[in-house]
Every structure is written in structure tokens, then in C-alpha cells.
Image (cartoon, rainbow, N blue to C red):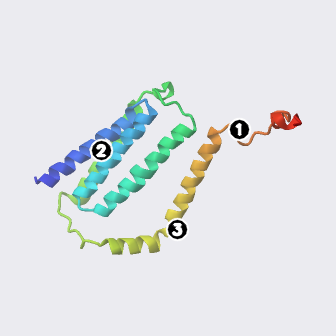
Amino acid sequence: MTGADVLLLALGAVAVGAGALVVATRHLVRAGLWLVVCLGALAGDYLVLTAELVAWVQVLIYVGAVVVLLLFAVMLTRAPIGPSDDLDRPGWAAALVGAGSGLGLAVLLIDAFRWSRVDLPAAGTAERLGEQLFRSWVLPFEVLSVLLLAALVGAIVLSRPDIGRRSTDTSAAQPADEGRRP
């Protein structure tokens, strides 16, 4: 076992542990911060696997954008930041489903590869990846950006009670000095 293997396993253990804390914590903001740790560990795994571009995309897109959007949505909608009683549910059903899914995936991978070595394709370049990304995947990225923008605008509208409400009192809408004459 090489040093890269040990580092890959350690970062994987950090990612799994942080992922478990994301779903186990009762604090919404702390769950978002544990998500940052989990996604950062995944970016570290990509770096160990010499996929630098994918690692930086992971950091920029997921850690930098999605988690910040999540935290802003929590702040804008005035969600409870402290512990929440409605999140304290029995977790045995979720643990059972998670364990069953993990075991099923492990059996599937072991059955598919039978501990054999897989020959890797030739390493790609950032130029080829960018060419493929901007020719074939431009429309999904644009649709996703519009969707995230709509979600942010919706969060702002939901957090502001004065938007969309008509004023019934017309005297409150007029400035106080309008009736005075100099």
C-alpha cells in the first residue's frame, strides 16, 4: 500500500464521517459546514487521483457556490439556526436504508470488478475537457444557472414580507412634510 493509497483512504474516511455528521446534526448551519468538510475531502481525493481540474471544479462549484447558496437561503428565509425539534426523528429507518444501499453497492462493485485491475485510458488534457464541456454541455449549465438564480430570487421574496403586499392605509404612504407650507 502506497502513501497515495493511505491518503486516499484517510480523505475518504473524512468524507464519510463528515457526510454522516451532515445528516446527524440538529443544527442546520453546522450541517452546511460539515457539508463543506465533506466536499473538501472529496476534492482532496480528486487531487490524490491527479484530477486537478475536477478537484478545483469541485471546490469552486460545490463548496464555493452551492454551500454558500445553501447558507444564504437559510439566512434569507429566516430558518431556525439553532437546534430544531422537528429534526429529532428516529433514525433507525434511514440507517437501515443507508446500510442496505451501501451493502448493495459494495456487492455490485465487487461482482463487477472481481478485484481485477482496470486499465486506465490515456490522460486527457484541460483543453480537450474544456472543448467537450463547452460544446456538449453548455445548455445544461445555463439551465442550472437560471434555476439557481430563480431559487435565490424566490428566497428573497419569501424572506421579505413587504414584497407583494398592498398597503391599505393611504395616509402612511404620504411623507409627513407634504402637508406643511414654508
- SS class, disc 3: helix
Q: CA distance from mark 1 to mark 3?
A: 35 Å
Number of the label disc, if any, that sits on residue 133: none
Which residue carries the number 1 mark? 162
Image quadrant occupied by the C terminus: top right
Residue 99 makes an appearance in the image: no
137 left or right of 47 in image: right
Q: Looking at the picture, does residue 151 appear above or below residue 83?
A: below
> What amino acid is at disc 3?
Leu
Q: Residue placed farthest to the top in the image?
A: 85
> What amino acid is at disc 2?
Ala
Number of the label disc, if any, that sits on residue 15: 2
Question: Where in the figure is residue 141, as x and y percent of width and height?
Answer: 49, 63
Q: How many marks?
A: 3
Residue located at (56% from left, 55% from top): 147
Tag 3–tag 2 contact (CB < 8 Å): no
Q: Nearer the viewer's eye, disc 1 or disc 3?
A: 1
Instruction: Categorize mark 1 by other alpha carbons within 10 Å: few (<14), some (14-19), many (20+).
Output: few
Question: Where in the figure is residue 154, as x and y percent of width and height?
Answer: 62, 47
Which residue carries the number 3 mark? 139
Q: Looking at the picture, does residue 113 appear above or below residue 99?
A: below
> What amino acid is at disc 1?
Asp
Residue located at (42% from left, 27% from top): 90
Q: CA distance from mark 3 to mark 2?
A: 31 Å
Q: CA distance from mark 1 to mark 2?
A: 42 Å
